[in-house]
Image (cartoon, helix red, strand yellow):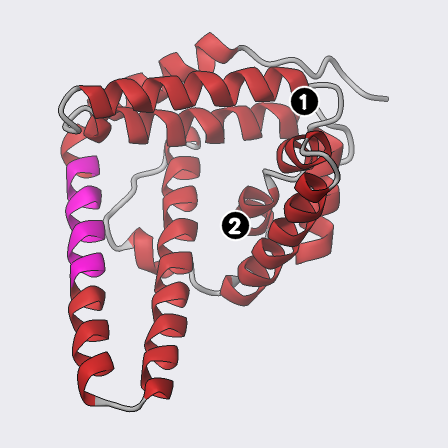
Amino acid sequence: MRKDHKFSKSEAIKFGLTITKRELKFFIGIFVIFILVNFAFNILAKDISQSFPFYFSIIVTIALSLVGTILQMGLIKISLNFLDNKKSQHIDLFTTHRPVFKFLTASILYGLIVFAGFILLVIPGIIWAIKFQFYSYLIVDKEMGPIEALKKSSQITKGVKLDLLVFSFLLTGINILGVLAFGIGLILTIPTTIIATAFVYRKLLSKTSGV
């Protein structure tokens, strides 16, 4: 039997902000790592494109995608660690690499589904984007396969799609405020919204039977 499937938007954002303020130095370190990795790959890609055949650029692009995916999975793992009251380290960004190909496969499927939805008069694309959005968390958190994760995301978002849409608007608004604060505010708003999203994921998952 399904339980009450609602979640508190304010509670999620408040939790995200509390963790971010408490761990602000940690998240500044995360920002620095992302900037350095991105800078290094941009320099590498530029040098290779000028000095090596075209297929080397393709290899670098693939490598960059893999690293970006690993970093994305690492961020999800870190956000879940905070929810579980576990200590996180910067190295955690790079250690959640085992399901990388599951993650990439699911991301491609998710992108195709959402793209198809937008072709069908936009609205289905928005609905499907919300419906399947937690596939990434399920792969990192529960080590599900791509199809299983997409199906489970569909299950846990049933009945709360409008709430999730409003929540996404709230998070976007928060990050816009971060941009308006000369961009520096993003150091506070991005971690807040990432952790708030993880909070909602766990809340919905806990309210779904058969987990």
- Report the disc number at residue 161: 1
Closer to the eye: label 1 or 2: 1
Give the residue furthest to the right: 1
Q: Is mark 1 on a helix, strand or loop?
A: helix
Residue positioned 16% across, 20% down in the render: 181
Horizontal relation, residue 76 to residue 152: left or right: left
In the rendered image, which quarter contains the C terminus?
top right
Q: Which amino acid type corresponds to the residue marked 2 in the rendered image?
A: Val
What segment carries the magenta color? 27-39
Q: Is residue 165 visible?
A: yes
- Report the disc number at residue 140: 2
In the rendered image, which quarter contains the N terminus?
top right
Residue positioned 54% across, 10% down in the render: 8
Q: Where is residue 131 in the image (x, y as percent from the top left)?
A: 68, 34
Q: Which amino acid type corresponds to the residue marked 1 in the rendered image?
A: Lys
Residue positioned 32% across, 79% down in the render: 57
Position above or below: 35 against 206? below
Is 54 in front, or is 32? Answer: 54
Overall secondary structure of the magenta section: helix
Confirm whether the magenta stretch covers residue 195.
Answer: no
Q: Position of residue 156 (x, y in %)?
A: 70, 30
Position above or below: 74 against 183? below
Q: Position of residue 60 (x, y in %)?
A: 32, 76
Q: Is mark 2 on a helix, strand or loop?
A: helix
Q: Considering only order in the chain, which callout, 2 or 1, is on the residue closer to the N terminus?
A: 2
